[in-house]
Image (cartoon, rainbow, N blue to C red):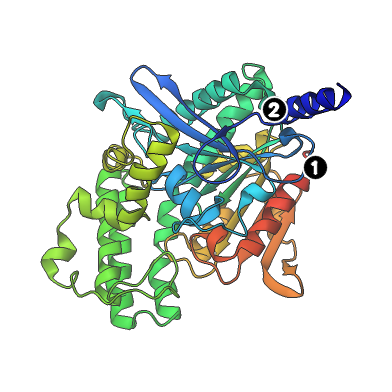
Amino acid sequence: MERLFICIFTTLCFLSASIGRRGFGPGEQEWGFVEVRPNASMFWWLYYTTADVKSYYDKPLMIWLQGGPGSSSTAYGNFEELGPLDTDLNPRNYTWVKNYNVLFIDNPVGTGFSYVNKSKFARTNAQIASDLLECIRGFYNQLPTFKSVPTYITTESYGGKMGAKFALVWYRAQKAGTIESNLKGVALGCAWISPIDTLMTWAPFLLRTGIVDRRGFDAIDTAAKETKDKVEARKWKQAFYCCANTYRIILTLTYNVDVYNILTKMNYSSSYLSQQNVSSFDKDTIYKYFQPGNDPLERLMNGPVKEALGLEVSHGNLSNKVYSYLTKDFMKPVTNIVGRLLNETNLNVFVYNGHMDVMSSISGTLVWLEKLKWKEADTWKNVMREPLVIEDIVEGYFKAQNNFRMYWVNRAGHMVPKDNPAAMEQILRDLISHPNE
């Protein structure tokens, strides 16, 4: 009888500790949809941490927002960068899930498994932030214990543009008491914060690294200046197409360099070389150029993943349209939002970039950072840069001023979590350990 009681007690303890579901891959998971507006639903996928803890809630919650716009967090961010499995379904030894609860959100609506009626696509960054806040409300409704868990928004590329506004909207709601939560910080990775400042560094970056010659520099720089003229005239849609043209010229002159990491081995391509290709635009081509992703990943999502999660919607069918509906917003800066985060909140605001990234170059990031109007801007500019040393290796550098930090990451391109996971791990440790003042 005593042995039977012990067995029953042990079983009950095990069952109470198992609070998630079996999804796709290792560990406990949870997922679902939130209707953020009528006919607009956002998909989220949570991985509970595999850390050795008494409770999952002892570890922070990291929210990951992919870029694009239209690239899927549940696909690209998960399988290409930081989830428990890579694209070959092998265990990833540097997955974030080892240390944190990780929440991937397919955002904006229409991205990945998220779905939307034609008239409900997001057209502005403000709408995206509002939708994300509603998604978090829905997430808390389903998993209310996470309300008290320290939470951080982590982003990449265009996800940084969306994440900055999201963080500000969320903080204000949290402070006003309209949402019960514990948002602590935001990390803007290779972020598309001030597009024109970034784009104006493309030609100098490629010249200094030997990717183009002086003639190539002149061609790219001329296209970039045309883009800048459109931005200054606030002709946002024309600026978008001029930006795309600048990118197409880079591909032409470099024979398909990887602008996300110039050290990546790429297949030679001469398919961009005609003047017609350089000057003509179609949405499918532009979408393909600007967004990371590949067909095998889509097959994975629409095959084994979709089946394991029991989903009826298809993955990625609307991502192209997500992108096209935001063309007028694409080149608009959000530097003022970052300034407000630093002036009006006590959130930790971290910025990080990989030094081999052309798309969101470190030099471009420094340009908009130097322009920021915030209470400690002058002090930060004069702070000494320190080395980011991990196991006696210099993995990068950082500058810190109270709740703001900037990281230069060595041996990394646009996808820092994938290219330099050691540096990324330290950045996350700093993010959660720095006190909010």
| Horizontal arrangement in the rendering, residue 200 relative to residue 96 (left or right) | left
Q: Residue furthest toward the left?
A: 276
| Nearer to us in this view, 323 or 161 | 323
Q: What residue is drawn where x is 77% and y is 75%?
A: 392
Q: Secondary structure at mark 2?
A: helix
Which amino acid lies under the numbered mark 2 shown in the image of this protein? Leu
Q: Position of residue 386 (x, y in %)?
A: 74, 67
Q: Secondary structure at mark 1?
A: loop
Residue 211 in view, yes or no: yes
CA gap, disc 1 and disc 2:
35 Å
Q: Which mark is residue 178?
A: none
| Nearer to us in this view, 410 or 348 | 410
Looking at the image, is mark 1 or mark 2 earlier in the sequence?
Answer: 2
Q: Residue furthest toward the right?
A: 2
Q: What residue is drawn where x is 25% and y is 68%?
A: 249
| Horizontal arrangement in the rendering, residue 7 relative to residue 368 (left or right) | right
| Horizontal arrangement in the rendering, residue 414 relative to residue 10 (left or right) | left
Residue 192 in view, yes or no: no
| Nearer to us in this view, 405 or 315 | 315
Residue at which label 1 appears: 435
Residue at which label 2 appears: 15
- The N terminus sits in image quarter: top right
